[in-house]
Amino acid sequence: MCATNCQHPETGDFSCDSCVKNHDERWCHKGHIQTYNGQLTVDGVTTTTTLGGYSTDIVVNDRFVCPIPAFYHGENLKYASPILCAGVTVGTGMRRGNVKAGSKVGVNGIGGLGIYAVLIAQAFGAEVFALTRSQSKVADLMAMGCKDVILTTDAEQVGKYAHQLDFIIDTVAVDHNIDQLLGLLAQNGSFCMVGAQPEPLKISPLALLMGGVQIFGSIIGSIQDTIDIINLCAEHKIIVPVEVIKPDYINEAYDRMYKSDVKYRFSIDIDAMRAE
C-alpha cells in the first residue's frame, strides 16, 4: 500500500493528519494507491493499473522501503515475504490490543494468518490458545507451543474457557459464530478482526454489554509497524513453512488455496520472470 496521493509530487511532503501526525499511511485521508491492481493517477489523469506485486522492478518512495533483517537473507528470504503481509496484519492487531507478556491470547482460524498469529503472540510473551474446527491440526499446534487447542465444534471445550482470554484475534473470512468467541473473553477483553467475511456480522448486543468487551478491526500495518514486526520475527527466528512457486503457477496455487491445500503460505519467485 502506497499513499502517494498524499504527497506533493515535487517535494515528497505528506500532508494529511494520518500520514504526518500518526505516521500511519494505511488511513491516508487523501486515499492510497494499492501496490497491485490499483489505479495510478497523475495530474488528475488515470494512467495505468499498478502491477507492483508482480513486477521484476518497482520504483517507490523511500518512505515505503522496509529493511529485511539479516536472519531472512539468503535461503531464508522466502520466509520474509509473508511476514510483510500476514505477519504484520496479525502483529499490528495484537499491538493495538495491548498483547504483552502474560496475556492470554486466543487465535481463531489456523491458516495463512492464524499460524503467524500463534507464533507472533508467543514472541510477545503471551500464552496462546488456538481455536479451530480441525482436530487434525491439534498436534502441530501443541508442538508450536500453544497452551491449549480449543475445538470450536466441542461445546464442552469452549465452555471450559468461558471468560478466560484477554484478547482474541479472529482470522476467519467466512460466516461464523462471533458470539461464541466473545463469550471466551474476560471482562474488558478485546476482539480483533482481521478476516474479512463477506456477510454482515451477527453479534448480540448483550455479548458486548455484559462483558465490557471491545471489537475492532485491523489491516496490514504502517511501515514502522512492518519494520517492528519483521524485526521481532527475526529476533525469535520465526519460520512458517512456505511453498515457493513460479509466476506461471499462480492460477493453480489460487485454486489450491481455496481447497486449503497449502501449509501455510505460497511465496512467488518473481525473479524467475527475468529468465523468461
Image (spheres, rainbow, N blue to C red):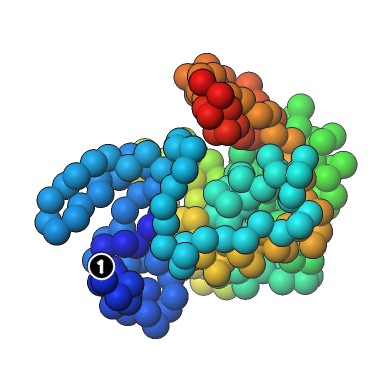
Q: Residue at x 62, y 72 (%)?
A: 98
Give me the residue at 77% from left, 40% from top: 75
On the picture, is 221 further left or further right than 27?
right
Residue 79 is drawn in which quadrant?
top right
Crowd tier of the residue under label 1, counting other residues whose Cα lies within 10 Å: few below 14, some 14–19, many 20 or above: few
Q: Is residue 78 visible?
A: yes
Seen as rendered, the residue at the extreme right is: 143
Q: Is residue 206 left or right of residue 166?
A: left
Q: Residue at x 43, y 70 (%)?
A: 24
Residue 165 picture location, percent across and down:
68, 61
Tell me residue 251's x, y (percent): 47, 19
| Residue highlighted by disc 1 | 9
Query: Up-down: is 75 above or below 124?
Result: above
In screen coordinates, is 222 left or right of 239? left
Q: Give the residue furthest to the bottom.
A: 21
Asked whether 169 or 3 is in front, the reply is: 3
Q: Position of residue 46 (x, y in %)?
A: 16, 47
Amino acid at circle 1: Pro
Helix, strand or loop for disc 1: loop
